[in-house]
Image (cartoon, rainbow, N blue to C red):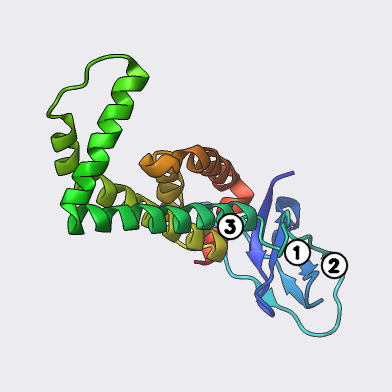
Amino acid sequence: MAAEVISCPACGHLVRVPDSLLGEAVRCPACKAYFTAPLRADDGTLGTAELLGDAPPPTVTASSPRRSLDGNPLFVPGIFLLFVGIVGTAVNGFQAYQAFADPDGMRARMELVKKQAAELLKMQVDDNAAEQWTKTAPIVFATVTAISLMTFIASICLLTHRFYWLAMAGSILAMFNLGNCCCLIGAPVGIYSLVKLFDPENRALFRRG
């Protein structure tokens, strides 16, 4: 059954109101206040819920949207993205700092990576590869650090139900965070977050932000 997620005018709790009850008196399951569910306008938008008096009118109790650990259906993907964002920012940020502050040390590490790559691929690696990698390392690590920061911001958006498209962008970027194997956890977390964000009921939670 189609439904709308509406904020209770008394306590702000999000309640799930079936379309068949729009315009009817409903009761908030959290604070027990009565309010009139808003009607849908011709352009498809909803009006404002109106708080009713203490006398209980004929009504039904609206249900809460699908809940998670703290009553937020986006809590779990938000926490996962938060973890990916914090770890990625810390690890990639440290690597970026080293690349800028200690180019000689970075060059030595790139030489080691070149040697390991040659042994793994069983082929000759360009002698200038380490030098080229050293020059691009600061840009690469700065980029993946920015991606991790975006993932962190997206996690806050999910947890607070604000800035839907920012939450979407950060979830997508989490899947492509290639620095330090962060994509191994970022890819499934990003996909899970997107699945939750595409849910119409979860997307409706962002209308209040």
Kindly identify which residue carries mark 3. Answer: 79
Place of residue 126 in the rendered image (x, y in percent of width and height, measured from the top left): 16, 22
Dots 2 and 1: beta carbons under 8 Å? yes
**Image height of 100 relative to 179, above or below:** below
Q: Earlier in the sequence, mark 1 or mark 3?
A: 1
Answer few, some or many: residues within 10 Å of disc 1's Cα (few below 14, many 20 plus, some between 14 and 19).
Answer: some
Residue 169 appears anywhere in the view = yes
Place of residue 167 in the rendered image (x, y in percent of width and height, measured from the top left): 46, 53
Q: Amino acid at mark 1?
A: Glu
**Image height of 10 relative to 121, above or below:** below
Q: Secondary structure at mark 2?
A: loop
Specify the farthest residue to the top.
Answer: 123
Kindly identify which residue carries mark 2. Answer: 59
Q: Residue at x 28, y 35 (%)?
A: 112
Tell which of 199 and 132 is nearer to you.
Answer: 132
Tell which of 154 and 122 is nearer to you.
Answer: 122
Place of residue 65 in the rendered image (x, y in percent of width and height, measured from the top left): 72, 57
Tell which of 38 and 147 is nearer to you.
Answer: 147
**Image height of 55 relative to 123, above or below:** below
Q: Residue at x 78, y 73 (%)?
A: 30
